[in-house]
Image (tube, coloured by chain):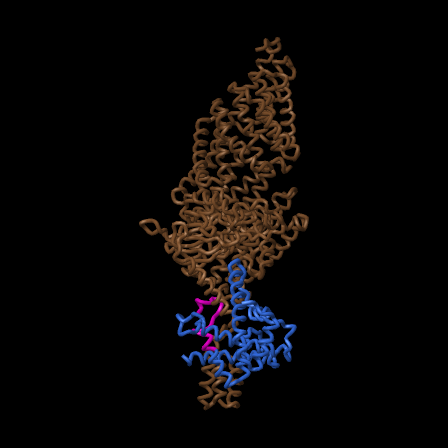
Chain colours: A blue, B brown
């Protein structure tokens, strides 16, 4: 498949935010391929002694896909919010679809052994997190947004505060409570 | 949940997170009151708090990225697994390294199944040159056969031209993981590490440098055997070595791991065995401290490179207690010490001192300041584990101080003043401690601190300025002051063995300064007697300590060291009986110790005692017994050297044995045997000087060998080589005198070589020429005598030269000169005999002089030439 121009990706993103679900179907393989190549590069880096850079893997994917200068969003914040939503959708779809069936009914379970840099306790899996996040949205919409931006969007506390137009302290408080709330939800949900 | 309720929960939750334990419980109690539901809600949330620290902190995309990459890798592997490469069937992937992927494979065409590790070398290295080098190196590496080295069996290229190596399959864990998983203590870690040193030493002896020593390359099997992998592979992989590719445009990926690389590797400079010693140091640092020597100062590759080249690593003992906050809990002091089955405090104490010094020595930036070999590194660790003194200990401070002084050009006097000011502070501590007698514990701690300070004055500071010209007076001042404090501490400190040991060492230090003052090149008059008194004080303490702690080898070794100093004083004073007595006692102690504490160090000392005894005996004319002792010394040194062929000290021991044997045999008129010994010595001194042409010590050895060989050959009538040998000796010797006109020893040596040349020419009947050399020798001996008037050796040699000069002069009908020379020789010898009545050489030579004097009148008649 020929790599679409940045412009094309921007168009697709815009179409999707205005409700065109079919745009997502076209976006998904693009994001996935990009993710794949970035991830492989990370592994190669790890091999030659580089530490896996945790910074902005997501941003790297976006920057390669989207021509930021041409994005005619109302503001940057909207762009990040949309990006996080998009990523959430794509990641959940990916987690459901890829060949991880042997690991617990089609979902990815991230154990310590599998991803040593991560401590998703105890058997957190992304699909379950997504589900718990939906429940959280019913209780506290903003806290679920914070998690979406932080976890799926890869934003820092400060960036999240920027996007949501609240203080850094508020995001910090939301984040703290959201995490324990989700953990409790996950431990009860199984 | 309704909104107001949720807001209430949130507010209380946020407040509760700021509280802990009892206070939190009280807060909940108060806040919830009767509202059990609210309390449960809050408690169930708070219960998750601990777990939540890391939860969701890594972005989802990254988790997935890792999984994707892993899966992609698995897909790659699936293409290879099951296929056959050469004779090996690929079974599973077992690792991924800098060089490429590693698979477990089995040899397919044999009746039995041999498991091997198959290493596929990553793409981009497929040039013909590379493949050719792989072939040649493979041959060399395949010969490495050592229990701690993973064997290389085979290698080649696959059908797709991918180079591969087939190696011994080791089922094990990297050494760091193994040690942590088994919670090995520091001594156990050292034991394991010594296996690695032995592997590296073995390879170095086979002229192979590893170039990439790191924990991932050192696997430990379930039986606790360390196996070093990938020997020399880095060289095969190092694209830099490829000829014709010196262009700066080519990006070279060096095949080593930066975190474990030496400064010279980072800088792309010449790599030697010292580079492996350095990497071994990094591995040991990690084994002992759980961290890299540089992690604090380096986060990026660039910072790491800078740190390796320019930043002095933190002392290991400091690294294990430092509470610098880090993300990685694995290096927290508690975690590190737990893995070593100890506490942070104890670990700190274990590493303080010798282990700190040993590690820092291995990690020196300059290769020449590291251990000269993996063996030397291992020897020091071994010495540490046995409680013997380690060689690294004395080096650090002087190394740093010398560096400091070079850098800052600080005057010596300033440095001394600074140190003395520190002492003024220390004195206050003593007084205070005396007042604070009630606070016994604190006082003890202070004594300990003061003892350490004094110790560092006595040893490190003293040693660091020792070699600086003009340092005698400040050295003596420093040591005397230190001694005063030590004596005070000893009086206060209830005869604490450590203090007493330092006190003895202090007496010995001043003794040594005094003894050196007795030596001419320090410009002082003889003060051997004073040295003797100080040595005796040290001896008394050492004897008590050794007797009270018969199991402490270190104390016995100290005692032997003091005895050696005393024997040397007796020898210098011409007191053979006493010297011999001390040497024989020394030998007895050594032989007793050997039964239980056999070590290279001890055997080397024993050999030294044999040589000392032989040296005395030869002056007494007991040549047979001297020869016997020297043969024992030679056998000891030679067998030690066979086991440790790179040790310079042992090579020196072997050389000394040959040189002394040559001398004694010459005195015993066994010239053929003497010449043979000289030649053996010469093979060593020639090798050493060619390796290290600027080392004046080795040059002296070489001069000595040429000179003694020349003399033995001349006496036995083999003249063909004589002139050449002596000329060589004189040439080297003259250069030495020229480069340092204050070097009395070099002058004395030069006088000797000239005398021997003269004697040889006399025996060859070149009388005029011979006389010129004897006159030259005469002038030089005079010069030496001006600077070193009390030297008996010089007097004896000078007299001998005069007698030869007189003989030649007599033959040349210069009766007046001959008579004058002989009378002078007679006078000198009479004086020497008065000082050392038992010296056989002196009495023999005196007899010769007198006989020649008697014969003189007859010599006035013209001689018929031979």
Magenta portion: prevailing SS class: loop
Relative image position of residue A158 (x, y in whole percent): 60, 75
Place residue B834 in its image quadrant: top right
Can you say whether B612 is above or below B54 in the image? above
Task: For residue B570, say whether it is visible.
Answer: yes
Name the quadrant of the C terminus of chain B. Answer: top right
Relative image position of residue B695 (x, y in whole percent): 59, 37
Question: Looking at the image, how many numbered discs can be counted on the residues?
Answer: 0
What range is drawn magenta here? A111-129
Can you say whether B797 is above or below A97 in the image? above
> Left or right: B119 with respect to B404?
left
> Left or right: B112 with respect to A92?
left
Relative image position of residue B810 (x, y in whole percent): 61, 14
Task: For residue B586, say whether it is visible.
Answer: no
| Residue A113 falls within the magenta-colored stretch | yes
Relative image position of residue B556 (x, y in whole percent): 45, 45
Front one among B111 and B538: B111
| Residue B321 falls within the magenta-colored stretch | no
Residue found at the very far front of the displayed protein: A1
Residue found at the very far left of the displayed protein: B111
Front one among B693 and B502: B693
């Amino acid at each position: 498949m020929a790599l679409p121009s940045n412009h094309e990706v921007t168009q697709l993103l815009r179409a999707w935010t205005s409700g065109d679900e079919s745009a997502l179907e076209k976006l998904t393989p693009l994001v996935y391929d990009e993710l794949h190549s970035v991830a492989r590069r990370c592994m190669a880096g790890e091999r030659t002694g580089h530490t896996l850079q945790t910074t902005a893997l997501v941003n790297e994917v976006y920057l390669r896909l989207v021509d930021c200068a041409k994005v005619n969003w109302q503001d940057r914040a909207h762009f990040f919010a949309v990006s996080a939503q998009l990523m959430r959708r794509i990641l959940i779809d990916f987690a459901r679809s890829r060949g991880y069936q042997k690991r617990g009914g089609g979902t990815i379970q991230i154990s310590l052994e599998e991803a040593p840099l991560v401590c998703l306790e105890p058997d957190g899996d992304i699909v379950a997190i997504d589900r718990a996040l939906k429940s959280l949205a019913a209780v506290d919409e903003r806290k679920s947004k914070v998690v979406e931006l932080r976890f799926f969007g890869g934003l820092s506390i400060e960036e999240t505060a920027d996007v949501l137009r609240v203080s850094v302290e508020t995001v910090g408080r939301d984040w703290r409570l959201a995490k324990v709330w989700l953990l409790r939800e996950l431990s009860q949900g199984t | 949940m309704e909104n107001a309720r949720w807001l209430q929960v949130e507010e209380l939750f946020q407040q509760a997170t700021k509280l802990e334990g009892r206070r939190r419980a009280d807060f909940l109690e108060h806040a919830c009151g009767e509202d059990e539901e609210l309390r449960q809600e809050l408690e169930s949330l708070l219960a998750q708090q601990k777990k939540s620290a890391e939860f969701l902190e890594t972005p989802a995309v990254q988790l997935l990225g890792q999984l994707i990459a892993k899966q992609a890798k698995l897909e790659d592997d699936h293409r290879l697994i099951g296929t056959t490469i050469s004779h090996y069937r690929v079974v599973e992937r077992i690792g991924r390294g800098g060089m490429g992927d590693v698979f477990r494979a089995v040899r397919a065409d044999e009746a039995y199944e041999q498991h091997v590790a198959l290493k596929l070398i990553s793409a981009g290295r497929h040039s013909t040159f590379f493949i050719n080098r792989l072939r040649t190196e493979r041959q060399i590496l395949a010969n490495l056969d050592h229990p701690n080295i993973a064997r290389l069996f085979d290698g080649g290229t696959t059908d797709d031209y991918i180079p591969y190596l087939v190696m011994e399959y080791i089922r094990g864990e990297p050494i760091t993981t193994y040690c942590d998983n088994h919670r090995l203590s520091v001594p156990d870690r050292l034991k394991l590490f010594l296996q690695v040193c032995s592997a590296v030493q073995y390879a170095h002896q086979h002229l192979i440098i590893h170039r990439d020593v790191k924990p991932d390359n050192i696997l430990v099997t379930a039986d606790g055997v360390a196996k070093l992998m990938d020997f020399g592979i880095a060289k095969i992989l190092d694209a830099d070595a490829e000829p014709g590719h010196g262009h700066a445009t080519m990006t070279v990926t060096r095949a080593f791991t930066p975190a474990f690389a030496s400064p010279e590797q980072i800088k792309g400079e010449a790599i030697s065995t010292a580079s492996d010693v350095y990497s071994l140091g990094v591995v040991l640092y990690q084994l002992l401290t759980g961290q890299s020597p540089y992690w604090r100062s380096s986060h990026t590759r660039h910072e790491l490179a800078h740190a390796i080249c320019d930043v002095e690593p933190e002392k290991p003992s400091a690294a294990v207690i430092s509470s610098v906050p880090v993300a990685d809990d694995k290096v927290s002091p508690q975690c590190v010490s737990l893995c070593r089955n100890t506490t942070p405090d104890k670990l700190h104490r274990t590493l303080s001192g010798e282990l700190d010094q040993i590690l820092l020595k291995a990690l020196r930036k300059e290769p020449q300041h590291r251990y000269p070999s993996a063996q030397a590194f291992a020897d020091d660790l071994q010495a540490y584990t046995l409680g013997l003194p380690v060689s690294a200990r004395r080096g650090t401070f002087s190394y740093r101080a010398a560096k400091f002084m070079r850098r800052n050009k600080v005057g010596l006097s300033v440095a001394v003043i600074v140190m003395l000011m520190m002492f003024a502070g220390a004195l206050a501590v003593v007084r205070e401690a005396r007042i604070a007698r009630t606070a016994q514990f604190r006082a003890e701690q202070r004594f300990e601190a003061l003892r350490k300070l004094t110790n560092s004055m006595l040893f490190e500071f003293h040693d660091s300025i020792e070699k600086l010209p003009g340092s005698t007076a400040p050295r003596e001042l420093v040591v005397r002051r230190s001694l005063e404090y030590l004596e005070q501490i000893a009086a206060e400190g209830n005869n604490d063995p450590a203090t007493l040991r330092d006190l003895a060492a202090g007496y010995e230090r001043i003794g040594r300064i005094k003894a050196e003052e007795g030596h001419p090149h320090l410009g002082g008059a003889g003060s051997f007697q004073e040295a003797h008194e100080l040595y005796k004080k040290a001896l008394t303490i050492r004897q008590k300590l050794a007797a009270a702690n018969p199991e402490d080898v270190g104390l016995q070794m100290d005692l032997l060291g003091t005895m050696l100093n005393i024997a040397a004083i007796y020898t210098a004073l011409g007191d053979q009986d006493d010297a011999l007595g001390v040497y024989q006692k020394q030998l007895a102690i050594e032989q007793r110790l050997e039964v239980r504490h056999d070590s290279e160090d001890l055997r080397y000392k024993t050999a030294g005692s044999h040589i000392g005894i032989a040296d005395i005996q030869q002056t007494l004319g007991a040549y047979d017994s001297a020869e016997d002792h020297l043969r024992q010394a030679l056998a000891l040194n030679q067998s030690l050297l066979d086991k440790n062929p790179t040790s310079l000290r042992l090579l020196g021991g072997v050389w000394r044995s040959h040189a002394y044997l040559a001398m004694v045999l010459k005195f015993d008129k066994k010239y053929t045997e003497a010449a043979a010994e000289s030649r053996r010595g010469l093979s060593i001194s020639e090798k050493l000087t060619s390796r290290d042409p600027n080392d004046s010590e080795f040059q002296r050895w070489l001069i000595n060998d040429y000179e003694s060989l020349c003399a033995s050959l001349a006496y036995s009538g083999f003249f063909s080589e004589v002139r050449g040998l002596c000329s060589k000796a004189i040439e080297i010797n003259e250069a030495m005198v020229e480069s340092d006109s204050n070097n009395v020893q070099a002058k004395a040596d030069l006088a000797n070589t000239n005398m021997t040349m003269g004697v040889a020419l006399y025996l060859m009947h070149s009388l005029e020429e011979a006389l010129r050399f004897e006159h030259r020798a005469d002038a030089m001996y005079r010069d030496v005598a001006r600077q070193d008037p009390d030297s008996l050796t010089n007097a004896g040699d000078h007299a001998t030269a005069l007698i030869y000069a007189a003989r030649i002069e007599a033959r040349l009908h210069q009766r007046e000169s001959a008579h004058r020379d002989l009378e002078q020789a007679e006078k000198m010898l009479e004086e020497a005999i008065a000082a050392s009545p038992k010296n056989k050489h002196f009495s023999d030579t005196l007899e010769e002089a007198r006989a020649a004097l008697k014969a003189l009148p007859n010599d006035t008649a013209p001689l018929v030439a031979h």
